Structure formats: C-alpha cells, structure tokens
Amino acid sequence: MADQLTIPWTGGTYVDHHFPVPHLHEAVATVRRRAHALLAEWGLAADTLEDALLVVSELITNAVLHALPPAVLRLRWSETEGCGTLHIAVTDGGPTPRDPGSAEETEPDEHGRGLGIVTALSARHGTHPGHGGVVTRWAEMPVG
C-alpha cells in the first residue's frame, strides 16, 4: 500500500495516500484496484465507493491518454466535526504536445465524457497548474 501520513489541521485530521500511475493504459485498472482497497479500508459505503472509483478512473485515464508522465494519484480523507470529505487528485506532467498538422480522431460517442462524469459525481472539482507545466486535476466528494 502507499505511504500514509496523518496530519492534524484546524478542526480535524486528514490521511493522505499517493499512488504512482505508470504511463500505460493498463495502469488505470491497476491503480483503480489499489484505490478500491484503500477506500474500502476507509469504510466508504458501496455507492460512494463506486462513485469515487469512477472519478478516480476518469482522472487517471485523462492523465495517461492526454498528459505527459509522471502521474500520481493522491487520495485524501479529511474529517471536520464528524463530516468527511474525500479529495481525489491526479497530478501529471502537463498536456502532451500536439502536432499542428494533425487532428485527433475521436468518436464523440466514445470519448469526452470524463469531465461530465467528474462534474456529476463530485461536489467540487477543478484544475490547478503548477510549476514547470505540471497540472493537478482534482475533485471533492462529501462522505457521511
């Protein structure tokens, strides 16, 4: 399992886990299984766990298909006054450079739904650019 760090903060505590994401299509399923084990260990209800895994899958898939390595999944459980929040974030190396002469061939029925899924299942989500082109895409889900 990933490294665990429990840190006190104003009003509660949080627990962080980081999972490296290999830059391979097969990595999505592998990291999803690891996230499932951790979220089950944290005691998430089955429906919340499945929603969280969909968000994890979408964010990881985006990083593997559309961004430069390295990528890292971060799951954080925070709790304040008995209310829990699951924070899901994937940091990657930024967008892959595109050849100006080529157009990406995508089938609209099969691609482009990731952000809609993340929007529908999370309370908040966004993108945070970092130094050197690094990008973090994140989502928060209330739990309990």
Image: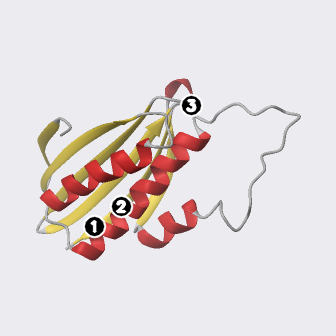
Three-letter amino acid code at disc 2? Leu
Query: Which residue is pictured at 42% across the width and 60% down the height?
Result: 55
Q: Is residue 140 above or below residue 30?
A: below
Cβ atoms under marks 2 and 3 closer than 8 Å: no
Q: Secondary structure at mark 3?
A: loop
Circle number at residue 53 = 2
| Circle 2 Cα neighbour tier, 10 Å, few/some/many (<14 / 14–19 / ≥20) | some
Relative to 121, 81 lies left or right: left
- Residue 49, numbered circle: 1
Alpha carbon separation for disc pair 3 and 1: 28 Å
Q: Residue at x 34, y 46 (%)?
A: 31
Q: Residue at (36%, 42%) from the top-left corner?
A: 73
Query: Percent x, y for residue 106?
Result: 74, 55
Looking at the image, which residue is at 12% across and 42% down? 7
Identify the image quadrant of residue 47.
Answer: bottom left
What's under tag 3, amino acid-wise?
Answer: Leu
Q: Position of residue 60 (x, y in %)?
A: 46, 47
56 is higher (above) or lower (below) than 144: above
Please state if 101 lies on the left or on the right of 93 as rendered: right
**Quadrant in the picture for residue 44:** bottom left
- As helix, strand or loop, the secondary structure at mark 1 comes to helix
**101 vs 94, nearest the viewer:** 101
| Quadrant position of the N terminus in the picture | top left
Instruction: Give the spatial CA distance, label 2 vs label 3.
Output: 22 Å
Q: Are marks 1 and 2 in contact (CB under 8 Å)?
A: yes
Amino acid type, callout 1: Leu
Rounded to the nearest angstrom, the CA distance separating label 1 from label 2 is: 6 Å
- Give the quarter of the figure containing the C terminus: bottom left
Q: Residue furthest top?
A: 132
Q: Which residue is mark 3?
A: 68
Which badge, 3 or 1, is on the more N-terminal residue? 1
Dot 1: within a 10 Å radius of its alpha carbon, few (fewer than 14), some, or many (20 or more) residues? some
